[in-house]
Image (tube, coloured by chain):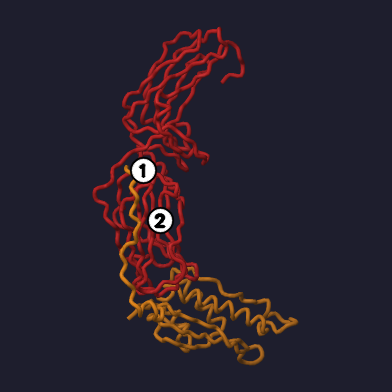
Amino acid sequence: MSFFSFGQSAEIDVVLNDAETRKKVEHKTEDGKKDKYFLFYDGETVSGKVNVTLKNPGKRLEHHGIKIEFVGQIELYYDRGNHHEFVSLVKDLARPGEITQSQTFDFEFTHVEKPYESYTGQNVKLRYFLRATVIRRLNDINKELDIVVHTLSTYPELNSSIKMEVGIEDCLHIEFEYNKSKYHLKDVIVGKIYFLLVRIKIKHMEIDIIKRETTGTGPSVYHENDTIAKYEIMDGAPVRGESIPIRLFLAGYDLTPTMRDINKKFSVRYYLNLVLIDEEERRYFKQQVWGGKNKSEGPRGHPRAVFAEEAPALT
Amino acid sequence: MADAIADTRRLYTKPQNLNDAYGPPSNFLEIDVSNPETVGVGRGRYTTYEVRLKTNLPIFKLKESSVRRRYSDFEWLRAELERESKVVVPPLPGKALFRQLPFRGDDGIFDDSFIEERRQGLEQFLNKVAGHPLAQNERCLHMFLQDEIVDKNYTPSKIRQA
């Protein structure tokens, strides 16, 4: 946008052909707000029109070409200068010359590959957008239209439950069970905690969902952990033989699919922590590395037993 | 993906044995610090406290015990636990060295309100520590709580249940 109206300037605008019928979804922006964007899937065609509207009708607009690009890129917040484009398509709309009146150009990107889901995170962003540009000698005129891409997956054929006995020898034994090993974003975690031995004074028990965003590679790997949810499932002291039910509706939380090593740039994984707190505020927890969500993934390898402070791990 | 309604019925649970439900809990552990008594005369005086324990935890050899301990015994226990175990040991009530200076208006470390404050702090300390699964494995804790005398020349070791 030029503040000096020497000569001609123009506004450029991108409109999709199916804007009336195409579904829009909410997606978080970098500053945490939620906006609505057109939803696309892998393989769908992206077509529309680019409108170039002259500011001063009658005067001509000289340019070095008009083009439209479809871009899929990964931005690392700490390295903004380098965008990693994994999809980059371009269509020339006009050869260098001039426009004497406002014009509309049609474009179509046929069956565009969109391999990854759109993601806006703490340190990294993956986005898709159309960018229309009027190339000029001194300053280009351009406009971007962001779209959101969701990846699809099918229900896994085999989605077995998880059942495991863990504890601290002679102090606490529990058996936990979750009804599935792969959950999708609108799913419900149904499970139970069965107490086999309780020799410590438990005050309450909760389930935490932790999101871990990993960016960078090699020595400069950075993990950002975020507790998405803390859900109390028991208040009070249980005894042997008691069963505590779990019913956690995932749709109420801000979750994304598990993303593994996207374009070798970042990963997003989820952990389910079962946390028991005793009367002296000591925390005992069992961490489950978790797959699931839209992508069909199961829990990784063997579950690790981790401890918050110095008390023994539940193994 | 069809918008199927998820099955949220509870998982099957075994009915609880009534003995387990209404019997005594397996985590019974009560520790009291009480009955402060000042022993000795003149400059050699010191205060001892009764440490009474009642439990049904198998890791404790005696289900009921009562011993007398002084503040320096608690300090010894704290140091042992810090060194021998991975427990983050809670603090003891203050050492109150300033109370041992002469020319005080009150009874110094034998002042009733000070002894009561200290008694409460020692009780809190022991309850915090004795319930810790890692601390329960330490020989020094069991000696402190249940042996007649604290043998400071003991060999540190871990206790495993029989």
User: What's the residue at 45%, 47% (across, down)?
Assistant: A254
> Quadrant where the N terminus of chain B lies?
top left
Q: Residues within 10 Å of mark 1 (few under 14, many from 20)?
A: many
Secondary structure type for disc 1: strand
| B46 displayed left or right of A120 | right
Given the image, on which type of amino acid does mark 2 rest?
Leu
| Vertical order, A217 against B106 (above or below) | above
In the image, B41: left or right of B81? right
- Is residue B134 visible from the viewing direction of this image? no
Q: Amino acid at mark 1?
A: Met
Q: Which mark is residue A248?
A: 2
Q: Nearer the viewer, mark 2 or mark 1?
A: 2
User: From this viewpoint, is residue A126 visible?
Assistant: yes
Q: Which residue is mark 1?
A: A259
User: On screen, A124 above or below B88?
Assistant: above
Residue that appears at 39% across and 85% down: B61
Q: Residue A87 is drawn in which quadrant?
A: top left
Q: Colour of chain B?
A: orange
Residue A308 x/y as whole percent: 44, 61
Q: How far apart are the two marked residues, 2 and 1, measured between alpha carbons?
A: 22 Å
State how many labels appear: 2
Which residue occupies the foreground of this view, B33 or A149?
Answer: A149
Q: Residue furthest left?
A: A157
Classify residue A6 as left or right of residue A181.
Answer: right
Residue drawn at 37 percent across, 78 percent down: B159
Q: Which chain is red?
A: A
Q: Chain of mark 1?
A: A
